[in-house]
Image (cartoon, helix red, strand yellow):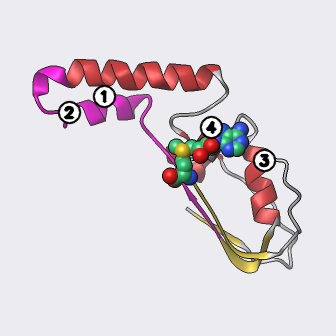
Amino acid sequence: MNEPLKPASFELVHARAVLCHLAERGAVLARLVAATRPGGWVVIEDVDFGGAAAAMAARYVVPAEAAGVSERIYRAIEAALAANGADACYGACYGPRISVRRPRQASSRLRV
Ligand SMILES: C[S@@+](CC[C@H](N)C(=O)[O-])C[C@H]1O[C@@H](n2cnc3c(N)ncnc32)[C@H](O)[C@@H]1O
């Protein structure tokens, strides 16, 4: 998280199921974007199992009688993560929440 990153030095940056754990995820994402070459790619994969997603996932539990337990487990994990600054719904939030500024001449893309 505090590793020095040379600006515009990576063609591809990939983080899977990591940013959701970091209270400073917005700042970390900005650093990752800054470390990406103009025209490069930032690929972020992250989780979404809290909130409404916990109830949705429960619909697919077999046997169906275990759906309530499944939802409670997901919600308990979500609460535990939140208590440490993590976000169990981060994967659902890139579009509406993420805003990363790059110099005008740069063209690195954050594809979500
Ligand atoms: C769910 S695992 C994902 C591992 C791997 N990226 C993958 O996709 O299989 C979450 C990862 O986040 C890392 N992590 C959590 N908090 C971190 C922190 N504060 N600094 C660095 N890494 C962290 C953990 O070490 C763990 O490897």
Mark 4 within 8 Å of ligand 1, using the beta carbon: yes
Q: Residues within 10 Å of mark 4 (few under 14, many from 20)?
A: some
Q: CA distance from mark 3 to mark 1?
A: 32 Å
Q: Which residue is mark 1?
A: 55
Tell me the amino acid under the disc marked 4.
His
The mark closer to the camera, 2 or 3, is 3
Q: Is residue 48 magenta?
A: yes
Marker disc for residue 31:
none
The answer to whether residue 40 is above or below residue 47 is: below
- Image-based side of 8 in relation to 10, left or right: right
Question: Which segment is the magenta one?
Answer: 42-66
The response on whether ligand 1 sits within 8 Å of label 3 is yes
In the picture of the structure, the residue carrying the numbered disc 2 is: 59
Residue at position x 28%, y 36% from top?
57
**From mark 2 to mark 1, how far is it between C-alphas?**
7 Å
Residue at horizontal 77 percent and vertical 49 percent from the top: 28
Q: Which mark is residue 21?
A: 4
Residue type, numbered disc 3: Met
Horizontal relation, residue 45 to residue 65: left or right? right
Give above or below for 12 relative to 45: below
Q: Which residue is mark 3?
A: 1
Secondary structure at badge 4 equals helix
* Drawn side of residue 10 relative to residue 69, left or right: right
Secondary structure, mark 1, is helix
Question: Mark 2: which amino acid?
Answer: Arg
Q: Earlier in the sequence, mark 3 or mark 1?
A: 3
Among the 4 quarters of the image, the one containing residue 97: top right
